[in-house]
Image: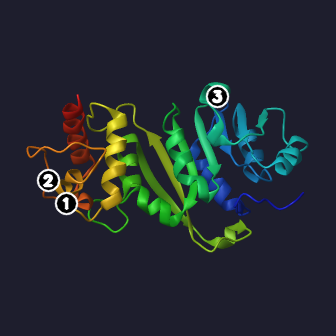
Amino acid sequence: MKKTKLGQHFLIDPSIVELELSIAELTKEDIVLEIGPGKGILTHQLAKKAKQVIAVELDPSFYDFLSHHVSENVLLINRDIMKISWDDIPSFTKVVANLPYQISSPVTFKLLETHFEKAVLIYQKEFADRMIACPGSKDYSRLSVGIAFKADCRIHKDISSSAFSPPPKVTSSLVELIPYEKPPFHVVDETTYFEVTKQLFSHRRKQIGTILKNSKLLPYDEDLLFLTKRVEELTPQEIGLLSNQLYELRS
């Protein structure tokens, strides 16, 4: 079996696998999505505890290997998770995965577009810190604001590089995501909220008024909220209020 070309570092520490399973709280009623199963160390344990595992593996060599080594309650899919429509695969109740680091952000937001009860995911620590960062901190970003609107996010444990093969050059973190049934604050239009967030955080140290005056994509009005505040100072709720105003201006 050839070495992966997809940038994955495979978890080899059984104690971390056990912790993932503990946080996931799997039952025989659960259908679990695993992204990037690789050699299957996590897959085998998930299959023991869940009703079914949906394992999406892009690398053909790992897919072939797994097809000869997994139990009957594992559904293997040899596709790119980013190109899969959620309508193309069975619905799932939980997500447990050691994500390839280079697709952390797009996969996370793709997951949060569909319904599930809980996700237990391993990320690069730097990425995980940005997920929970507060306004004014160096890690506060577009990611922080997006996650704050979509899910409760908790970092359970930092993981050393020795827990993986090959060992990455960075520390990793074990993260739990529980999607909100209802967002913690109101936005009129979710697409506008994420568009505004993207545009603002391209200039995170600038004042809102300066950004909007020079923007070709967002409208400006002197009565808008927070014009003299810097982007990095705004809470997710305040960005929500601003996005609501901008949506109304466009309408």
| Mark seen at residue 29 | 3
Callout 3 secondary element: loop
Instruction: Pick whichever of labels 1 and 2 is earlier in the sequence.
Output: 1
Q: Is residue 239 left or right of residue 100?
A: left
| Mark seen at residue 227 | 2
Residue 210 lies in quadrant: bottom left
**Image quarter of the C terminus:** top left
Exactly how many numbered labels are in the figure? 3
The 10 Å Cα crowd at callout 2, few under 14, some 14 to 19, many 20 or more, is: some
The 10 Å Cα crowd at callout 3, few under 14, some 14 to 19, many 20 or more, is: few
x, y (%) of residue 30? Answer: 63, 32
- Which amino acid, by three-letter code, is at mark 3? Glu
Instruction: Pick whichever of labels 1 and 3 is earlier in the sequence.
Output: 3
x, y (%) of residue 236? Answer: 28, 48
Mark 1 vs mark 3, CA separation in Å: 50 Å
Q: Residue lying at the far left in this picture: please name it.
A: 223
Q: How is the image coloured?
A: rainbow
Callout 1 secondary element: loop
Residue ID at (64%, 28%): 29
Residues at discs 1 and 2 in contact (Cβ within 8 Å): yes
Residue ID at (56%, 53%): 104
Between circles 2 and 3, the one closer to the viewer is 2
Q: Is residue 47 left or right of residue 131?
A: right
User: Which is more toward the observer, 161 or 204?
Assistant: 204
User: Which is more toward the observer, 228 or 177?
Assistant: 228
